[in-house]
Amino acid sequence: MKVWKLLLLLFLALICSCGKENKKQENTSGKHKLVVYATDEFRKSGLEHSIVPDFQKKHNCQLEVILFRNTADLSKAVKSRANYGKYDLAIGIDNSFVMSETLAVNFVPPESFDTDLLIKETVFDPSLRLIPYAYSNLSLVYNTSLVKNPPQSFGELQDAKYLSQIAICDPQTSGLGRTMLFWSVALFGTEGYEHLWKSLRKNIYKTYPNYNETLETLNRGECSFIIGYNTTPAFLQELDPLNNKFEVSMLKEGSYQYIEAIGIHRGTKKLSLCNKFVNHFLSSEAQKMVIYKLGMFPANRKTLLPMHFSTIPFITYCVNDRLPQSIIKEQINTWLDFWERLFGYQVAEGRGLRAEG
């Protein structure tokens, strides 16, 4: 009888031990997985495939990337209380959405990061809750086969000879589009921007939910101009040295800087691994991929630029500082409502969203 009792106790002890071991394995597995929120562009551009596999191999971990169709949807997701603690990192948050919505509070600065690596003009969150990884300046990009003498100012761009010749991004869904809207307000004021866009409306071909669709429209010759990155022609020439199809006109009124950032969610339980990914993403090796996949300047100032990027003139006259965040947050819905009334019928696809605080 005593033997049977002893065997029973040993059997129960073995079961408990296995249960504890399984729990331990599950917890260990959990520590090595990061959930990343990002826009579709992170995958479609090839940037994800260029930087994620190396990080996973080096740190013996897994990144689960959850994609959102545009910046507006990504911003809504990172702010949602229902998503608190369900993700670790967000990639693709840009300065226009951060300035117009309450986004930065959802993130924390990395534990250790060499801030000297960053080009100081790209840092739009002084607390570094959102760390820039890519930037470009807004400009007029044009098709050289259709335009020989491009406009040099917003005034010239209003000329009737450019009827239905300009494609732009929708500021309700696109970070680039919202930056473009801020650019116009910074240049012409909270009343003057309305006059500008009313004058330009006849020349607007369509508005698109993202930059890629806008650029494809220009490439197909459906329009002559787009408002886009000053790095776009150089990017396309890096991919194909014979591609001289596009050029840039830096409008004389000044430019506006568009910046994309990565952030560590304040609800993460994997801060150390998140910190390692941020440092990986901002390394010179990964930052080269920002150039070749996103077609933008890297935020890491030590990253060597390829030939066509190194010849882009440095923009000294950006007007971002003219538009403080207090004014943006106060007026953003008024601006978006105006935009919807003026251009809502021209959106190529998708619906716009009002900014949510």
Image (tube, helix red, strand yellow):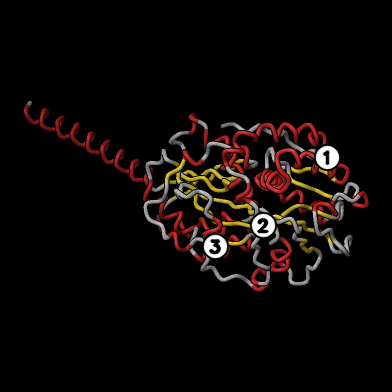
Where does the image place residue 127, in percent across and percent down from the top left?
Answer: 44, 48
Residue where numbered disc 1 is placed: 198
Residue placed furthest toward the top? 1
Q: Is residue 312 above or below residue 13?
A: below
Q: Residue at x 63, y 49 (%)?
A: 41
Three-letter code, disc 3: Gln
Please name whichever residue, 338 or 79, is drawn nearer the observer in this view of the structure: 338
Of the numbered discs in the image, which one, if any, rests on residue 287?
Answer: 3
Quadrant holding the C terminus: top right
Where does the image place residue 171, in percent across and percent down from the top left?
Answer: 70, 41
Residue 210 appears anywhere in the view: no
Of the numbered discs in the image, which one, if any, rests on residue 137?
Answer: 2
Three-letter code, disc 1: Lys
Mark 1 and mark 3 lie on one chain; the one further toward the N terminus is 1
The total of numbered circles placed on residues is 3
Q: Is residue 182 above or below residue 84?
A: below
Label 2's element? strand
Q: Would you say 168 lies left or right of 122 here?
A: right
Separation of marks 2 and 3 at Cα, in angstroms: 18 Å
Mark 3 neighbour class, 10 Å CA radius: few under 14, some 14 to 19, many 20 or more: many
Mark 2 neighbour class, 10 Å CA radius: few under 14, some 14 to 19, many 20 or more: many
Separation of marks 1 and 3 at Cα, in angstroms: 39 Å
Residue placed furthest toward the left? 2
Q: Would you say 292 lies left or right of 236 here?
A: left
Label 3's element? helix
Instruction: Place residue 68 in its image quadrant.
Output: top right
Of the numbered discs in the image, which one, if any, rests on residue 106?
Answer: none
Label 1's element? helix
Mark 2 and mark 3 lie on one chain; the one further toward the N terminus is 2
Q: Nearer the viewer, mark 2 or mark 3?
A: 2
Quadrant holding the N terminus: top left
